[in-house]
Amino acid sequence: MRNDRADIETGRDQMSERIDDAIDTLPTELATIIRLSFFDGYTQAEIAQSSGCCQKTISNRIRVALAMLRKELND
């Protein structure tokens, strides 16, 4: 049981590292939006307000960034 838990934690750490590395491949603006949205808990409205963009722009950038991340992680 102990080894199973350690294996799960190791796998989780490796996946987190892969995700961080994939985010680092994004253009800076997209990486920032992804981190603010998914890791720092900001809403799209909050990101839009602080960046001076409209919420639709932030939504589109998240969509583009997620597509890029899926491609990066599946390669």
Image (tube, helix red, strand yellow):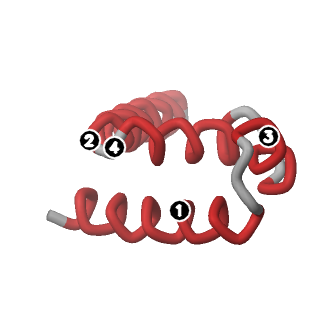
Q: Amino acid at mark 4?
A: Pro
Tag 2 near tag 3, CB within 8 Å:
no
Residue drawn 73% across the image and 44% down it: 52
Label 2 crowd bin: few (<14), some (14–19), many (20+), radius 10 Å? few
Front residue of this view, candidates 12 and 67? 67
**In the image, which disc is placed on residue 27?**
4
Q: How many marks?
A: 4
Across and down, in percent, residue 74 comes to 23, 66
Q: Are marks 4 and 3 in contact (CB under 8 Å)?
A: no
User: Looking at the image, do the residues carrying marks 1 and 2 touch, with CB atoms under 8 Å apart?
Assistant: no
Looking at the image, which residue sits at the far left?
A: 75
Residue tagged 2:
25
Q: Earlier in the sequence, mark 4 or mark 3?
A: 4
Mark 2 and mark 3: span between their CA atoms? 21 Å
Measure how far apart labels 1 and 4 are at the Cα level: 11 Å
Q: Is residue 63 above or below residue 50?
A: below
Image mark for residue 61: 1
Sooner in the amino-acid sequence: mark 1 or mark 2: 2
Q: Which of the 4 image quarters holds residue 62?
A: bottom right
Q: Residue furthest front?
A: 52
Q: Which mark is residue 41?
A: 3
